[in-house]
Image: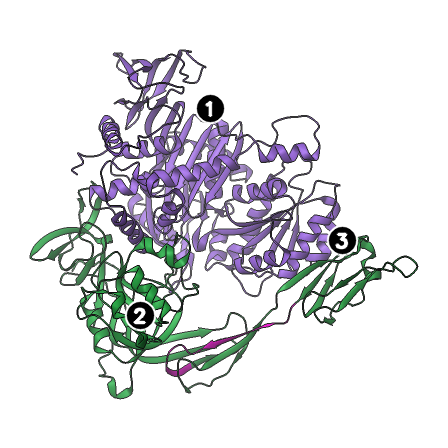
Amino acid sequence: MEIKSILATDCGSTTTKAILIEKIADEYRLAVRGEAPTTVEAPFEDVTKGVLNAVMEVEELAGRKLLNGDQIITPRNGADGVDIYISTSSAGGGLQMMVAGVVKSMTGESAERAALGAGSIVMDVLASNDGRKPHEKITRIRQLRPDMILLSGGIDGGTTKHVVELAEILAAANPKPRLGQNFKLPVIYAGNKKATENIKETLGTITDLDITENIRPVLERENLKPSRDKIHDLFMEHVMQQAPGYKKLMTWTDAPIMPTPGAVGALIEMVAEKEDISVVGVDIGGATTDIFSVFQKQFNRTVSANLGMSYSICNVLAETGLKNVLRWVPFDIDEKELTNRIGNKMIRPTTVPQSLEELVIEQAIAREALRLSFIQHKSFAVNLKGVQKERTISDAFEQTDSGESLVDMMELDLMIGSGGVLSHAPRREQSARMLIDSFLPEGITQLAVDSIFMMPQLGVMANIEKEDLAKDARKAAIEVFEKDCLIHLGTCIAPVGPSKSGTAVLTAELTLPGGSTERHEIKFGDIVRIEVPYEPVNAKLTPGKGMDIGAGKNETIETTIYGGVVGIILDGRGRPMTISTDPQQRIADLTKWSNAVNEYPEIKV
Amino acid sequence: MAHAYTPGLKVLHETIINKERRLPLKGTVTVEKGQAVTPDDIVATTDLPGNVQMVNVANILNIDAADIHEAMQVKEGMKVKKGEQIAETKGLFGLFKSNVEAPVDSTVEVISDVTGQIVLREPPIPVEIDAYISGHIQDVIPEEGVMIKSEGVFIQGIFGIGGESRGELATLTDSREDEISAAMITPEMKGKIIVGGSLISLSAYKKALQLQVAGVVVGGFNYFDLEEILGYTLGVAITGQEDLITSLILTEGYGKIRMGQRTFELLKENHGKFASVNGATQIRAGVIRPEIVIPLKKEELKGDQKDADASEGIQAGSLVRVIRAPYFGRMGKVIELPSDLRKMESETMVRVAIIEIDGENIDIPRANLEMVETD
């Protein structure tokens, strides 16, 4: 079947967003979008109402019939309806899991990776060696009430004792699911095959136990996919069944409903694979920050549960400290006053910055939230398979603990930002600066934002498994992602190496789309923005003495780069970047950098 | 007429207050429908499952897990006393025996021959729920709890710490602009709920704690002082579990902010009456705000009640409070709700309300306004 139109919704905790994609002249494009408040909570308690409201808006804007009463018309019937309808969901707090493994840094971490990759929030990682006594673990399990538990531990054929011990702890806690009082808690066992019978004996009757392949069949290999798939299945079968209205919604969709972050991850994975590039994606929300990355073809996702811009804004302040926030603020402000202001944003989370000063402070905090989230991501996205040699247990322990991060900023090709503070910044230059300052890309990196957060819906589309739909749906996901979803901010070029003030760190010779050429010499500590639209620019980039822009020290690169709504940013501030601790110097530097990219209107202090 | 939904905090001089009092697990409801209750009356009780202790008997006795049943002297389901011997090895010719004693009074739940450990469950923990406010039992939820109905004053704060508390109201300041100073707090305040104007300093709050004041209701408190009270930096506004004698309720926010006029007047009018307060705050989906409930006697009711759950949107003429800088804390009247997006100084494009503040008309983002719901 040829797919001509696709309707997709994302049911968030507050808003349900619908998009309509149509095929026009052999190309899939976003036609219209609509949104409506999510209706999971009282008084409606039926998610489909919000979905219908959002679709109704799409219907009006598209000027054609998509609904027949309370039904989405699918498959298409002449000019009415759509070929497929799909949805993602993070309503009702999303998917919340607890994971368990024998060794925290090995099977514990693998289980965590599988759960995060499936789009879950990991509430806690239990492990035999996590330092907590059994009764402490039991209390914790009871307190948390997860949606499901992923239990792993041991390599296939190894000792069974520890993983059975963990199962006994789970059994003693007798955990109840968060939703649906009368249901048994879903537990996935993905550990040592040899222990399966014992696990069934211990957990078989009191939980809804599901057995899948070992997440870590041998020390040096992770096998996450079976667990991730199982999590998605159980999310549909159990968690979604308990959420108001989802039973009905599930019968409407042509593909399983995916947890929103799981779908975003799937899309990022697909883009990285198709383009053969390294990607970092970030979604900064009010309560949490999600980071997705693909480096060396390996996907990782982390959720920083309490680093967000409203509900958990004070936690950002607590974790980073006032000094780190203030280093991004180009004016003097009373510290007591500032902490009270941030506190007031936490208790009144829906307010927006009216004054420029408030905006600058909020974006300063965002830089820190992003920076801290990325530190967490880097320490989690580590390489397990680094050395392909026989090793002893102790080697493996060492490898995981000191495991080299997969995240290599010089290797990074594309960075995508989303979430209110990045997507809705009054000036795109602000989004670009926030991404650069907090992630510190090295060498040549493209920057983009997902302005209306379409990635979840595109992620489900890319993952449709029905044979007759899969090819077209994937094509549609890629085309819409490239043409409508991303707002290309431009490219950041940042040389790495030691230097000192006033020394040239980069010379860029650019041949712009019209054929004109420009030459820019960047000195250490400077930023230059060149306004170029999203079109190819031939660039000859020569690093200063001792500097590297990706080809090695002192090596010139000739390549094609792209501009964007912001343009090309030559960042000569060095990596790692330092900000002066002298307040006067700091303010002067920040103001200079802001003005160089036209970040803010003139700040009156 | 233009209309916008702007949630606000409730300041109601007379309303019906329905309080659900529910057990964490099923149990027994100890009151009947229609019965009058006072705050300290127990309305429901239950037993929470006891804590679990795990003892690795095989490790202690240095035996194989598979042999644990031979060494165990008690069976699954049996009750054991603290110090009671529960397992023993055969030893060598009956000598050099080693044994295991029960670490707590408990019931043997599981004996595992895979891991060699046993699971002991301690006795259940009784839980009681009190009425919290005075009123009548409106409804009984069988085995789970009750709904209590009361009539009186209902005031919501913006943020609080400490859980439920109760006591006589004592207004300490003459005006809503004055701070509560340490000197104002005297030993007579023990067990009372004290009310002040714009701020309570850290030292004054500490004195209230020391003198066992039941609660403080005030306009503001400094955010960074919370750390000293709580022992940690408050990262997310989810509170209520703090072990504090003195619950603290802020009506306006962090910093020195004069208490809303209506709030202050209402609390002052009820000086000397008995109030129940709860500092518990949850700013997430399913928001919970701290509250002050002053149940009134029949003869004190005027009969001009307002529904505590009714929430109106703002419209021209509404009284609103600005809840973000640069006009934070200012009150004003809505003049107009234009439908077009307007550009703020920050260049953010937002829907605004035009507010008259001190005779001047100012554009304020609607998101930065709070409806002042009074009656």
Q: Are marks 2 and 3 on the same chain?
A: yes
Circles 3 and 1: CB atoms closer than 8 Å? no
Query: For the C terminus of chain B, which image quadrant?
Result: bottom left
User: For the residue marked with disc 3, what is the amino acid?
Assistant: Asn
Subunit bearing disc 1: A
Query: For the N terminus of chain B, which image quadrant?
Result: bottom left
Place of residue A307 in the rendered image (x, y in percent of width and height, measured from the top left):
40, 45
User: For the residue marked with disc 2, what is the amino acid?
Assistant: Asp
Q: Badge 2: how crowded within 10 Å, few (<14), some, or many (20+)? A: few
From the image, tell me which residue sits under label 3: B59
Q: Which residues are magenta?
A: B122-138
Element on which disc 1 rests: loop
Place of residue A304 in the rendered image (x, y in percent of width and height, measured from the top left):
45, 44
Identify the chain drawn in purple.
Answer: A
Instruction: Tell me the CA gap for discs 3 and 1.
Output: 50 Å
Place of residue A448 in the rendered image (x, y in percent of width and height, measured from the top left):
36, 31
Subunit bearing disc 3: B
Chain B display color: green
